[in-house]
Image (spheres, coloured by chain):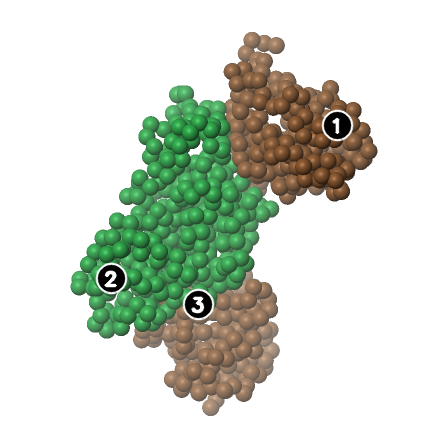
Chain colours: A brown, B green
Amino acid sequence: MTANQLTTYLDAELLPFPFCPGCGHSMILDKLNEALVQLQLEPKKVVMVTDIGCAGLSDKYFVTNTFHGLHGRSITYATGIKLANPELEVIVLMGDGACGIGGHHLINAARRNIGITVLVFNNLNYGMTGGEHSVTTPPGGRTSSTLLGNIEQPMDICGTAAINGATYVARSTAFDKHLTDLLVSAIFNDGFSLLDIWELCTAYYVPNNRFNKTLLDETMSSINFPAGILADKKRPELSRALRDQWQPGTDDQPLTSKSIDKKYDHQVAHTERIIIAGAAGAKTASAASALCRGAILSGLYATQRNDYMVTVKSGYSISEVILSTEPVNYTTIKDAHRLVIPFSEGITKMQPMLGRLDHSQALYINSALLPVQTAAKLYIMDLQKTGKKKEYWTIMALAEMLRQSKIYPLGAFIDALSYRKEYAIKNIEAVEKSVNLIEPG
Amino acid sequence: MREFVNGAELIARAAIHAECNFFAGYPITPATPILLHMLKELPKVNGIAIQAEDEIASIGFCIGAAMSGSRVMTATSGPGISLYSENIGLAIMGEVPVVIVNVQRMGPATGGATTVAQGDIQFMRWGTSGGYPVIVLAPATASDCYDLTLKAFDLAERFRSPVFLATDKEVVSTHTTIDVDRFQTQAVRPRITAPIDSTFVPYRIANLSDTPPISHFGGQHTVRFTTSSHDEYGYLSKDPKEVGRLNQHLSAKINNHLGEISLTELDHQDGAETLLISYGITSGSVREAVQYARNHGAKVSSLTVYSLWPVPESHVRNATKRVNRVVVAELNNRQYLHEIKRITKDVQEVIGVTRVDGELISPEQILSEGKIL
């Protein structure tokens, strides 16, 4: 060893560890210290992450960075730390309790192969809260919450991590003479590492079960949970893989201002309230959006409020559009000046309003939906006969509404429909197909 | 210059402008568009955006990343805030700058996913154990989403605290025409970091109301972070003196700086005896109601509250000085009304105008229930 090598990662002033006599935690931490000394990691580049339980008291004794968080969530903090700074060596020290409350995070961290090392201090019960059973309590295990013996199947932590993609997985006991080597390999591994380290809880599990070192090994084999290295493979590590996907200098710039400059003149006196009552999946919202953009191109202010069921491809889809010469503060429409209904889903939803409309209000409706009970002025369109697919019907109905009402020039609507280039040609074709759709009379 | 945008896009744009470089979230209507924007945009500016396995992990990732030097944001809706709850407490205790966008939808529980509400106003303030303060900003319009997202990042840095952006389904997803020139482009102040060449004590402060400078994992100092009651070194403590000082500090660092946080807009009319108070989406209806009332000869003032928590008490007191009726309009079961009543005891009449059926409060409802016309 050279002079500037570290001989310990433990803080001598704070030792000894605070654990019960014979508790496995101290043994594991001593081995972890040995592993760190072997690896000679810069302490400022190491973060020990702990959560709740006796194992959660461990971080304090290390001269590295430490993060002490909520019960079962240490893997999430560790993931965030590693994602933000891949140069850091992030080591989670948690108990078997955390495998229960935070088991979901364990599976997902393994699946993602985030480059952290998780050490499970597995003493088969909750040592801090009074010896209750955990997800790893062996069959028959007596704890303060399994008074008649545990009847639940213990969780195979290693099997779970390995089958979900962890790149280094091993099981041992705190007494294992290879533990230091396993710790070195686990920390050295680029991706997600997990060590399931079985140990004795001398406060509870040992006295409650006449448990000992020999039984620790015997229990492991009796339930077919093998010891040793159970996974050791290579797979891209998440924090670096995400960075490989970075696209600096891409042509597609981050969200920037896309201004819509006035090009046309409108004929709106003050405000036009238009409801488009269509079917989900039939481009109601995007057609309404084009109607709004066309209005802005014509010097108006526009708002578009959408309403739909939770499903996006079935049921109604309503867009309330307000076009005004002034900014719009209240975006709900009680009674529309114009109601556009290309689909039956829309008419069902609009039934209450239809009854309220009078002759000063206009209803633009697909002829297939007639008859309809309303006093509104009717503009009837046979959308079916255009031969266009249903997804273009709303655009066609709006184009005819604009031709009829002259709210603003059709050219503005066509410009707006070209806003997304990939749809422009087909959208414009639909507008052309819609000429004279409104039936005379 | 005009644009046709919604709040979701403007929140994402402002976040990028604020140099947010870490986002984690979990899909939930109506907050998902923010997650999608961030997943699309952050890789272009060498930032990390990730969809987590659940909301607990979302905020956990953000907290870990923040302590490693990232500027972080997450977005969810009411049910997600429930799952954030414990970690919000952690962010308060450990003093983590994190911006949390809450796109409110109708509750309780899963409620109405695509339905507007303002039902989380007290929940955001009191939704974690201990009762220590957080900051809550409420944009009333899409443009406000831009300005207040910048402000949220700025305050998160200033106070090392979780800052909520309390939006709702309508503000975030309704498209509207905005005048781009009206955006504020105020820069977000840099994180206050500890000097590199000095001894670093993670939670050392001279005065209770100070915010301790931060040092990140991987930087020049050894950093201790903890969610448990701790001394200034970040070691677990049960010493009543230390614990008491810590907890008083967590309140004082926010509550003693109301002037830096309070943000309201008063539309005052001389001679008005009624003041309408609102926040978020409901302010649009109030604006409309005020215009209508004035056009019809009534005198009325209005106050839009942008900083809901801590309550901007002096602003409210000033605005209510010469009125004898206060009307508080909100889309919930009178949650902010209680705060207003608490600080307007001299006002003759304080009325709540509410709606909890998923529709917006209309200007007509405000005018009639507020006894204005």
Q: Residue at x 52, y 61 (%)?
A: B111
Where is residue A283 shown, x and y percent of the image?
A: 54, 68
Give the residue type that dot 1 points to. Answer: Phe
Q: Is residue B187 visible?
A: yes
Q: Secondary structure at mark 2?
A: loop
Mark 1 closeness class: few <14, some 14–19, many ≥20 residues within 10 Å: some
Q: On the image, which quarter does residue B327 sit in? A: bottom left
Relative to residue A350, is residue A188 depicted above or below? above
Is A75 left or right of B208, judged from the image as shown? right
Estimate the spatial distance between the alpha carbons at disc 3 and disc 1, rounded to whole Å. Answer: 63 Å
Q: Secondary structure at mark 1?
A: loop
Where is residue A314 shown, x and y percent of the image?
A: 60, 69
Is B151 left or right of A237, judged from the image as shown? left
Where is residue A104 shown, x and y percent of the image?
A: 64, 43
Give the residue type that dot 2 points to. Answer: Gln
Residue pointed to by mark 3: B359
Give the residue type that dot 3 points to. Answer: Glu
Residue pointed to by mark 1: A211
Q: Are marks 1 and 2 in contact (CB under 8 Å)?
A: no
Residue pointed to by mark 2: B348
Choose the circle earlier in sequence order: 3 or 2. Answer: 2
The answer for which chain carries disc 3 is B
Q: Which is nearer the eye, B121 or A337? A: B121
